[in-house]
Image: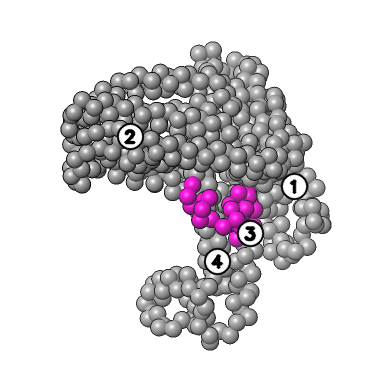
Amino acid sequence: MNKRTRLLVLLAVIALCFVFLWPSISWYGRTPKELQQLALGSTENIKNYAELKAAEDVRKIKKLDLSSTITEDYSWLKKDVSKRYKALDKKVPAELTWKDVLSAYDSELDFLTVFQTRYREEILKAKHYYENSVKLGLDLSGGMNIIVKADLDAALESMGDAVATENAADFKKEAMANAIENLSSRIDKFGLTSPVIRQQGDDRIYIEIPGAAQADAINTLIMGKGILNFRLVDMEATNQFKAYYAQNPATTFNAIGELMDPSIIPEDCEVFGEYRKDEYGLDERYDWVVVKKEIALDGQHVKSAIVGSDEFTNQPEVHFQLDSEGAVIFGDFTGAHVGENLAIVSDNKVKSNARIQTAITGGSVSLSGGFSYEEADNIKKVLQTAWLNVPLEVESQQVIGASLGEDAIRAGAKAILLGLGLILIFMLIYYKASGINAVVAQVLNLFMMFSILSAFNLTLTLSSIAGMILTIGMAVDANVLIFERIKEELRQGKSRPVAISMGFDNAFWAIMDSNITTFIAAIFLSQLGTGAIQGFAVSLAIGVVSSVFTALFVSRLIFDFDTDVLHAKKVSIGWGIKQ
């Protein structure tokens, strides 16, 4: 590989590392603390904040003199207003007044939506930076970690003969995926800050919750179970209720969500909201449905659920399979109620409201209702929560104080900076100008390590900081080997280009041998170890790869640059070296 190609490779690596590290730079260096707190909140809190802030801004604007020009604080509106004027084939005024701005929107709600969108996108952008940045472990940020054991054998046993022996492994895999999905939904609904929920081994779920959280509340969420059932819809009562609600929206329900006048619906019915996912990914009520209190079919009879499409219209459908008992119950019920609507109710929310076209027998059911593939996938997940009933048990729980985290961050930062600083000072003193080469390689080494941590969304802990500090020493060791080999060649009277070339060649296998054995050990530790051991091993493995690259590739390129571009004839590489 010639020097120009090596330079291009190095520049490409630096650019790629910068792209990977940009979310971390943006989150920790460019995002204000207030915005961080909002982004770390639950999605529901973000939605509420955006709505309240937008309403506050619109109220403030309505009180202004509409003939005045818009202020700098709202200059971002100009782009949207210009787009709307062009859509109406109207010329954009040179000086936009608030009257001009308001005339571009069809209604106050339309104007309000623009502000909500701006606040939402700003917070979600910061949230995206956090999700793709280097995370601070609980030992640095404080919080709680929990290990939950999923009893997959009990879940498999509860299915009886519904799952064939050869399909047991696939069943357990899907059961774990859905258990994690359910836990994520429950914890995020509670309003906690950016929980980390991932599978650990075959049957355990690891949960990290940064910040303060109540242990009892978390345990209740983990052990809680959703309720899913099928109920008949009373369309006449539904239409009557919606007409009543349109006239009395403020007095229909009390503070705890109960009807203030129960007589507006039949005694054998209940009223629930019909929900779909909004732009935040949260359940959003868009309609009301009155359903019978009597449960037509319990969700426990659902065996499996998949998303498909109609063979003629290609519209999304949800297909699910019932067990033998459920098939009989559902067949009799749908046969008696052809032409009526059937609702899927989950946690007192209507997730689907479909018409019964014909009696459904045999236990194979298809739902179609003009919904999108995303809505169909949500219905599938709702159904899966019923049949994949995985018993969960909290195995361990640890709470770490935030003050400990702050102390740990300061101690870790000091250790890295002090270690790096002392090593680099030694290299500059002992190896003179060539020490600059080692300094550049070390700085780039740390840059690459943090970039890789950010690229793979890895977590920075005290143990991983220890791995980084060890890597700094190992990376300098590679530079020492190379420099000493170069000094040997110079003592034999060889020229700068020859001494550098032979120095790198002679040191290559010594460096590779030591780093390969360390890398193998780190890989085994990362796979077999847990917790602090795993964090140390992962950062060590990353450091080994980056240090080899900087020592053999970057350091060589810097020497060659001095030789070919700066036309250096001698090597400043230590005391007592005569050339």
Q: Quadrant of the N terminus?
A: top left
Q: Can residue 390 be seen from the camera position used here?
A: yes
In this rendering, the label closer to the viewer, 2 or 4: 2
Percent x, y of residue 270: 75, 47
In this rendering, the label closer to the viewer, 3 or 1: 3
Give the residue at mark 2: 575
In this rendering, the label closer to the viewer, 1 or 4: 4
User: What residue is rendered at 54% in x and 12% in y?
Assistant: 165
Give the residue at mark 3: 49
In this view, the residue in front, 11 or 504, is: 504
Q: Residue furthest bottom?
A: 67
Disc 1 + disc 4, Cβ < 8 Å: no
Q: Which comes before the other along the chain, label 1 or label 4?
A: 4
Give the residue at mark 1: 270
To which quarter of the image does residue 216 belong?
top right
Percent x, y of residue 70: 51, 79
Q: Residues within 10 Å of mark 1 (few under 14, many from 20)?
A: many
The scheme the figure's colours follow is one colour
